[in-house]
Amino acid sequence: MINAVAKGTRKEKACADELEAKGYITRKSIRVKYQKVDFFGFDVMALAKDGSHMLFVQVKSNRCDMKTRDAIKKLKFPPSIKKEIWIFKDRKYFIKEYYS
């Protein structure tokens, strides 16, 4: 049996590690007793070290349905905040989709 929570946590950590390697300061969403506390529906929040912009990243496995994409597109944030969906493909790499 697959532990979906642990699997998702590993993907979020891989995403945060990649962003940190690019120079971002990151925070991951946390899980509190069977309930996820996230950032406006996103899994990872990253702030550029110079403070110029912020990323909100939704991490998915293999696919992302249109309902989720549309919900992310509709969210309104200031121009300095970027929205991204990272899809972990074939257990090897991320496919990244960018929304402003």
Image (tube, helix red, strand yellow):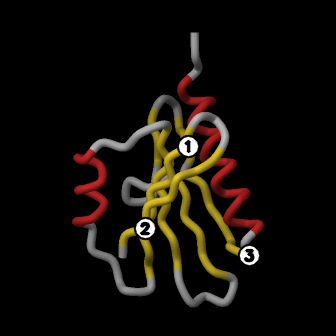
Which label was assigned to residue 88? Answer: 1
Per the image, label 2 sits on a secondary structure element best described as strand
Q: Position of residue 62 (x, y in %)?
A: 47, 37
Question: Which part of the image, by quadrant, shows the C terminus?
Answer: bottom left
In front: 93, or 59? Answer: 93
Question: Which part of the image, by quadrant, shows the N terminus?
Answer: top right
- Discs 3/1, front: 1
Q: Is residue 28 above or below residue 9?
A: below
Name which of mark 1 and mark 2 comes first in the sequence. Answer: 1
Per the image, label 1 sits on a secondary structure element best described as strand
Name which of mark 3 and mark 1 comes first in the sequence. Answer: 3
Per the image, label 3 sits on a secondary structure element best described as loop
- Left or right: 14 with respect to 28? right
Name which residue type carries label 2. Tyr
Residue shown at 60%/76% (left/top)? Answer: 47
Residue shown at 62%/30% (left/top)? Answer: 6
- Left or right: 38 with respect to 19? left
Q: Position of residue 80 (x, y in %)?
A: 44, 86
Q: Position of residue 93 (x, y in %)?
A: 63, 47
Instruction: Please give the residue where the numbered disc 2 appears in the rendered image.
Output: 98
Instruction: Please give the residue where the numbered disc 3 appears in the rendered image.
Output: 23
Q: Is residue 73 above or below residue 90?
A: below
Residue shown at 52%/53% (left/top)? Answer: 95
Q: Position of residue 25 (x, y in %)?
A: 68, 71
Q: CA distance from mark 1 to mark 2?
A: 15 Å
